[in-house]
Image: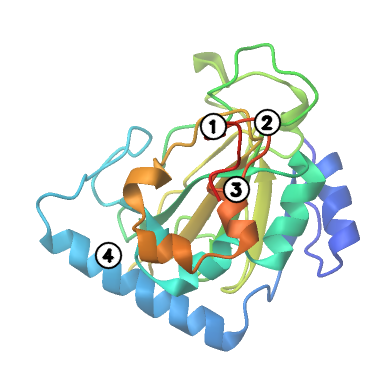
């Protein structure tokens, strides 16, 4: 079995890891202040959603409601906007997908003590098989808490991006590696990588991730940004973010032959 690549702060090396292993780990991608702000906002929004009966609870790949999801993070706090357009993340997006690319979704995932292991999957479910050697998506996992052996660290199969198909039922016993990383780290992996949420066996430790998912520009986004985000948000968005949200475009998504913005 292929091992996980060593963590690195060298972006060229991180790009090489994505090509070879399908995954890279970059420690200290968030400053202490950025991490503190994002973590505060994340747990604030978790508390809000827990009290709101109208919020969609659960997710198809989660085996129980202890594994909690946060949707549409762009509209919730500026710290999540910063993650979506973070220079490190976009450097990796450009390496894997080229430019322009789309932000398909940005969500949060929280495991709490007792959360069960999630379903084995790859995120390139929107592409017919067999997949080509050209990846169509990239996941960037921002670690707001330490990822440990006990608290539900993401489990994945390095090198599975070269198998070019979704996991089958017979693959459920495949050997997987837990991604161990400190809070503030960035873990990026291709949409073809087999992975799942780990089981939280800790007594009192949570594990929070922010998960922007990027795709090539030919795919419809999971989140409908045109209905989700208000005019004020779009007016204040950067050019790169407008491109990621399809408000700036060329060739596709035009209005009377022109880019919407």
Find residue 248 and name its label: 3
Pick whichever of labels 1 and 4 is earlier in the sequence.
4
| Left or right of residue 98, residue 57 in this image | left
Is residue 208 in view from this perspective?
no
* Callouts 1 and 4 close, C-beta under 8 Å: no
Find residue 46 and name its label: 4
From the viewer's perspective, is residue 14 above or below residue 183? above
* Callouts 1 and 2 close, C-beta under 8 Å: no
Is residue 182 in view from this perspective?
yes
Which of the two residues, 9 or 174, is positioned nearer the viewer here?
9
Which of the two residues, 152 or 246, is positioned nearer the viewer here?
246
Q: Position of residue 228 (x, y in %)?
A: 33, 49
Residue sitting at x 62%, y 30%: 252
- Between label 2 and label 4, give the one nearer the viewer: 2
- Between label 1 and label 4, give the one nearer the viewer: 1
Which SS class for mark 2? loop
Which SS class for mark 3? loop
Pick whichever of labels 3 and 1 is earlier in the sequence.
3
From the viewer's perspective, is residue 226 above or below residue 140? above
Q: CA distance from mark 1 to mark 4?
A: 41 Å
Q: CA distance from mark 3 to mark 4?
A: 31 Å
Q: CA distance from mark 2 to mark 4?
A: 39 Å
For disc 1, the marked residue is 256
For disc 2, the marked residue is 251
């Amino acid at each position: 079995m292929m091992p996980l690549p060593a963590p690195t702060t060298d972006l060229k090396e991180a790009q090489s890891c994505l090509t070879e292993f399908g995954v890279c780990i970059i420690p200290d991608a968030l400053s202490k202040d950025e991490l503190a702000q994002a973590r505060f906002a994340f747990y604030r929004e978790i508390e809000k959603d827990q009290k709101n009966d109208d919020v969609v609870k659960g997710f198809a790949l989660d085996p129980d409601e202890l594994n909690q999801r946060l949707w549409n993070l762009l509209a919730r706090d500026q710290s999540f906007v910063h993650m979506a357009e973070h220079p490190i993340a976009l450097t990796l997006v450009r390496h894997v997908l080229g430019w322009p690319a789309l932000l398909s979704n940005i969500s949060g995932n929280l495991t709490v003590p007792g959360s069960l292991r999630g379903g084995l999957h790859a995120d390139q479910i929107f592409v017919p098989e067999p997949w080509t050697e050209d990846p169509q998506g990239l996941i960037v996992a921002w670690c707001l808490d330490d990822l440990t052996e006990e608290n539900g660290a993401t489990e994945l199969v390095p090198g599975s991006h070269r198998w070019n198909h979704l996991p089958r039922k017979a693959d459920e016993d495949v050997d997987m590696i837990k991604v161990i990383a400190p809070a503030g780290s960035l873990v990026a992996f291709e949409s073809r990588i087999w992975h799942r949420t780990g089981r939280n066996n800790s007594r009192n430790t949570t594990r929070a991730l922010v998960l922007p998912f990027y795709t090539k520009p030919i795919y419809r986004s999971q989140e409908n940004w045109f209905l989700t985000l208000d005019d004020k948000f779009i007016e204040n968005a950067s050019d790169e973010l407008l491109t990621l949200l399809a408000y700036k475009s060329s060739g596709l998504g035009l209005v009377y032959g022109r880019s919407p913005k």
